[in-house]
Image (cartoon, rainbow, N blue to C red):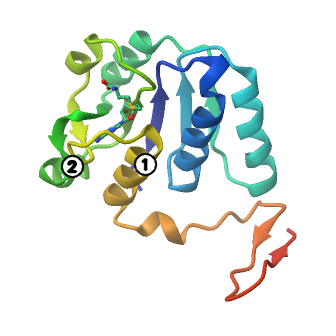
Amino acid sequence: MTRIVVLRIGHRPERDQRVTTHVGLTARALGAEGMYLAASDTGVVTSIRDVVDRWGGTFFCQDNVKWRRCIQDWKKDGGTVVHLTMYGLNLPTVISELRTRDPILVIVGAEKVPGDIYGLADYNVAVTGQPHSEISSLAVFLDQLFKGKELERTYPDASIRIIPSKAGKKTGGA
Ligand SMILES: C[S@@+](CC[C@H](N)C(=O)[O-])C[C@H]1O[C@@H](n2cnc3c(N)ncnc32)[C@H](O)[C@@H]1O
């Protein structure tokens, strides 16, 4: 599977904690390796690490990341940078090309993103030209990129896991 890391920019600790945590959890559940957070927020980092401890895997969350340096370093190392924005090229027109790229840094914003991001990204990609959210756009992007394969992933080192059931809630231990 393509190596994916998410770069979350524009995070405002006083109001975006829940959404940013959900960006990280979505990234983890749908096959990304980690999330860089371009802000300081130990609350988000702790919440995500707590999920990883219990539910398994090696997903990382790093805060205090300088977004410009992060993008430059990623490109210097040969990676591709995709910025999710409703102003970009619509996903179906670029998804085949993106499936040939590895690794990919996926940038999602909170409010208005700095204008420089559009020029620094290799691809500005829209998940429809309609406004919605960083969580939904990331989820659709990852599912399209991985063609649904990420839905079959298991976590052998998890200390808690769901036993899928038609009705009721069943969980198991390690
Ligand atoms: C609440 S939106 C803010 C959009 C903001 N008004 C702007 O001008 O970019 C937060 C983030 O969701 C993502 N997003 C929202 N709608 C999108 C779409 N249709 N396609 C791709 N990403 C989208 C983008 O990453 C955006 O930065």
Indicate the position of residue 91 as horizontal and vertical percent values.
21, 49
As displayed, is residue 35 above or below residue 115?
below
Q: Which residue is mark 2?
A: 91
Q: Which residue is mark 1?
A: 136
**Going 63% across and 32% down the picture, which residue do you hit?**
61
Q: Earlier in the sequence, mark 2 or mark 1?
A: 2
Indicate the position of residue 31 as horizontal and vertical percent values.
50, 53
As displayed, is residue 6 above or below residue 71?
below
**Going 47% across and 44% down the picture, which residue do you hit?**
135
Q: Is residue 141 left or right of residue 136?
A: left
Q: Is residue 112 left or right of residue 49?
A: left
Ligand 1 is within 8 Å of the C-beta of the residue at disc 2? yes
Q: Secondary structure at mark 2?
A: helix
Indicate which label's residue lies in the foreground, 2 or 1: 1
Is there a contact, CB below 8 Å, between mark 2 and mark 1? no
Q: Secondary structure at mark 1?
A: helix
